[in-house]
Image: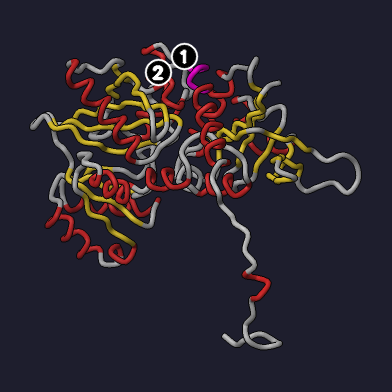
Amino acid sequence: MKTRVAMLFGGKSVEHEVSVISGIQAIRSMDTDKYEVIPVYMTKKNEMYIGEEIGRIESYRDIPALLGKSQRVILLNQDGRVYFMGYPMKRFGRNTEIDVDVIFPVVHGTNVEDGALQGYLKTIGIPFVGCDVTASAIGMDKFIMKTVLKEHAIPVLDAKEYTLSDYADMEGLLSSVEKYVGYPAIVKPVNLGSSVGISVAKNRAELSAAVDDGFRYATKILVEHAITQLREINCSVLGDENEAIASECEEPLHTKDILSYEDKYVSGSKSGGSKGMASVSRKIPADLSPEQREEVRDLAVRSFKALGCNGVSRIDFMIDEETGRLYFNEINTIPGSLAFYLWEPIGIPYRELLDRMIGLALKRARAEEALTFTFDTNILSTATFGGSKGGKL
């Protein structure tokens, strides 16, 4: 009997379109002898739809038309099984009702990759692929993530965090950056990926514009000193917090001071249609000495485990060529294209990668089923607020 997998993509995120590409890429690579795959599209309002056209990338050229011939669904737990139910439910006739064994979120960015969706799936009671709530949330918050990694002796650049209250005093914010960070400075929304809202500032005017841009996408920004002689090296990790392995390393190539959204998802596609992160210009394997390669791969696995990750993540590192030091930059807990292009060079095809990720999700579900989350007491049988009409607060 096949395992029924709901491949979930889209969602309320600035990385919505990238997620659609990643999700449909994954669907096309699934082992259909082993899995029955249900494509599920989440709109930018987080409404879920299924249908014959949902798994076809060409259908997303006209999303209103796609939704018009698709079925909106909601998740419902009935008697320990989780179903996608047609919504609104019909008064007459048969309602759509599809039970699933595991959900595979291929989503990117705030509201979907940051633990919010994972918390919802956990509450519903359905096994899901990838990081749990805690790891997802930490992995998305760059400042908290740095704090956790420092506790595990993972090298990160020092950074300052600024909030909307700081933004209200722009002159004070700019002066603080100049005092504690200096130029060149790199400004990042604290909880976004895909290089959205990230820019490098070499003077006060550029810093002011960078801060404005960062706060367009988040209520907090991170500012750190930019490495001037920078090499970016990425490595993916597969596993869980107990056992994990590293992929091949890559060096992404970019057109500016940092790898931009356009570099990642637009400029690399010769055909004019994006193929997600798989279309980025890159060197695989990265031009590293054997010692450097192993240092990156070892640090990737250590970082993955320190953050309590599960499934596949891509970890982006920085090498300061002036000093030779290697720094953790950020983690993508659900990377674009699921970083399959980093696993194929070491003999793990995309189909096998997806299979292992589902296996890790089911392994975690079995472990959690063995835990005790409730215990019987008689506390409610004697509870009272001290009066027949209840006590006043």
| Helix, strand or loop for the magenta stretch, by majority | helix
| Segment colored magenta | 349-354
* Residue depicted at x 59% and y 17%: 31
**10 Å crowding of disc 2: few (<14), some (14-19), many (20+):** many
* Residue depicted at x 72% and y 35%: 99
The three-letter code of the residue at mark 1 reads Pro
Residues under labels 1 and 2: Cα distance?
7 Å
Tell me whether circle 1 and circle 2 mark residues in contact (CB < 8 Å). yes
Residue 63, image x, y percentages: 63, 36
In the depicted structure, whether residue 291 falls above or below residue 199:
above
The three-letter code of the residue at mark 2 reads Trp
Residue situated furthest right in the rendering: 92
Classify residue 347 as left or right of residue 23: left
- Say which of 334 and 187 sits in front: 334
For the C terminus, give its image quadrant. Answer: bottom right
Classify residue 151 as left or right of residue 359: left
When asked about the image quadrant of residue 256, the answer is top left
**10 Å crowding of disc 1: few (<14), some (14-19), many (20+):** some
- Say which of 275 and 30 sits in front: 30
Determine which of the numbered discs, if any, sits on residue 349 in the image. 1
Residue 138, image x, y percentages: 38, 47
Mark 1 or 2 closer to N-term? 2
Determine which of the numbered discs, if any, sits on residue 343 in the image. 2
